[in-house]
Image (spheres, rainbow, N blue to C red):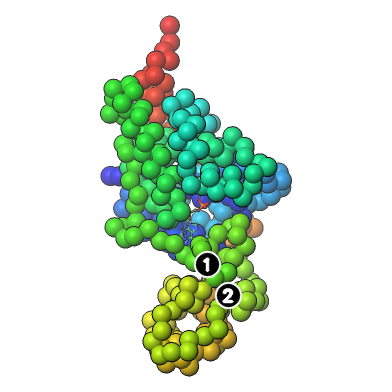
């Protein structure tokens, strides 16, 4: 059986991008594989959360994982910072990660551009920590959205380099896992780019009806088609993409036809989209809120997950230390 690993950074609540890009597939994956799903709280430190926010965000993501259908009896669900073997493997992998290659990653270059006054070493070695997350369980498959493709490529590079350096065939080279489909990019509401936590363009699974309506009604559009069957612009295509995720095919076709014949009213389309998002989100939101208030359950799940994850992680680390040459007298 293959080992699958995936993580979500705990920098806020889950949005529709996380859900349709990753979580939806996690639920299917847990039926067929040996799965590890974790909350990347060390990774969230690059954005300096307050201690209260740090804790609360971890708790939210755990409640959201469970509310969307991850089952602690089928998968190992854990918090990254409960597994001290991960930072130790990160230290070891850092010795064979070159500053030049880390500086060349797109996400690091983006950070240098967008926050030149805070280019911390944690950002530079972010892909090494992610590789440690993946390799600690000797994972074969990693489900990711398009945005994480390069980080996964780095993990493969570090696995290969370790094997080569110590002349072993120890770490598998982790492959992307999306059931053979192309990696997904769920768009945001600001007309361009992906839905994200930091961009403020997202709809969260815990959003209430009123804020969903408000956000969708404010989504960027254009001045409308003037010629029959004209090409759909990016902001409108993004609305259609979101509609494709939450609305029925009939609804999507209805608005596509209205667009093609230049009769579309974006206000009507947005109203429909908002109602369909609400219908989709409402039952999940209710589950999240009820699970989040059950602290005993969350503690039990996190403890059980940490114990299972550590058992496997400590075996890997023992073997890695032996391979490297840390031996008892
Ligand atoms: P994060 O927390 O940004 O996102 C978690 C997962 O959601 C996917 N995703 C999206 N997919 C499609 N469209 C979107 N708009 C969208 N936004 C987010 C991401 O691709 C990801 O699958 N570095 C990782 C967390 C991490 C990790 C790991 C992942 C740490 N260690 C090890 C896998 C394996 C991150 O920041 O994801």
Q: Is residue 185 above or below residue 274?
A: above
Q: Crowding near pointer 1: few (<14 within 10 Å), some, many (20+)? A: some
318 left or right of 120 in image: left
Which element type, helix, strand or loop, lies under badge 2? loop
| Residue under label 2 | 220
In this view, the residue in front, 203 or 222, is: 222
Q: Position of residue 200 (x, y in %)?
A: 62, 62
Q: Residue at horizontal 51%, vertical 56%?
A: 65
Compared with 85, 54 (above or below) is: below
- Which disc is residue 84 wearing? none
- Whole-percent x and y of residue 10? 58, 50
Residue 36 visible somewhere in the drawing = no
- Front residue of 238/92: it is 238
Q: Specify whether residue 277 is in view.
A: yes
- Count of labels in the image: 2
Residue 278 image-quadrant placement:
bottom right
Q: Quadrant of residue 327?
A: top left
The quarter of the image holding the C terminus is: top left
Q: Residue at x 40, y 44 (%)?
A: 152
Label 1 element class: loop
Nearest to N terminus: mark 1 or mark 2:
1
Q: Are marks 1 and 2 in contact (CB under 8 Å)?
A: yes
Res. 40 image quadrant: top right
Which residue appears farthest toward the top when viewing the image?
Answer: 329
Q: Residue at x 36, y 27 (%)?
A: 162
Quadrant (top left/top right/bottom left/bottom right) for the N terminus: top left
Height in image: 229 above or below 117? below
Look at mark 1 in the image and give the residue it sits on: 192
Position of 51 compared to 216: left or right? right
Mark 1 to mark 2 CA distance (whole Å): 9 Å
Q: Position of residue 32 (x, y in %)?
A: 31, 53
């Amino acid at each position: 059986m293959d080992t699958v690993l995936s993580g979500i950074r705990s920098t806020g609540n889950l949005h529709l991008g996380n859900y349709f890009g990753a979580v939806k597939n996690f639920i299917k994956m847990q039926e067929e594989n040996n799965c590890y799903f974790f909350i990347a709280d060390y990774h969230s430190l690059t954005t300096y959360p307050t201690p209260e926010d740090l804790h609360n965000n971890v708790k939210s993501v755990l409640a959201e994982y469970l509310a969307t259908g991850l089952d602690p009896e089928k998968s190992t669900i854990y918090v990254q910072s409960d597994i001290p073997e991960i930072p130790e493997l990160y230290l070891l992998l850092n010795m064979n990660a070159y500053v030049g290659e880390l500086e060349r990653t797109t996400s690091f270059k983006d950070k240098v551009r967008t926050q030149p006054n805070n280019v911390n070493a944690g950002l530079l070695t972010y892909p090494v920590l992610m590789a440690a997350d993946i390799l600690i369980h000797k994972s074969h498959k990693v489900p990711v959205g398009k945005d994480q493709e390069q980080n996964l490529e780095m993990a493969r590079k570090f696995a290969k380099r370790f094997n080569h350096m110590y002349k072993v065939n120890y770490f598998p080279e982790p492959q992307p896992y999306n059931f053979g489909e192309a990696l997904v990019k769920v768009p945001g509401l600001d007309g361009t780019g992906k839905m994200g936590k930091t961009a403020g363009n997202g709809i969260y699974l815990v959003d209430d009806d009123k804020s969903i309506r408000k956000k969708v009604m404010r989504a960027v559009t254009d001045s409308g088609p003037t010629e029959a069957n004209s090409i759909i612009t990016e902001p409108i295509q993004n609305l259609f993409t979101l509609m494709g995720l939450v609305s029925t095919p009939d609804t999507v076709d209805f608005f596509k036809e209205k667009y093609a014949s230049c009769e579309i009213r974006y206000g009507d389309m947005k109203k429909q989209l908002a109602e369909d998002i609400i219908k989709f989100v409402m039952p999940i939101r209710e589950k999240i809120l009820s699970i989040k208030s059950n602290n005993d359950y969350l503690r039990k799940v996190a403890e059980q997950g940490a114990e299972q994850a550590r058992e496997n992680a400590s075996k890997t680390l023992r073997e890695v230390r032996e391979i490297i040459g840390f031996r008892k007298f």
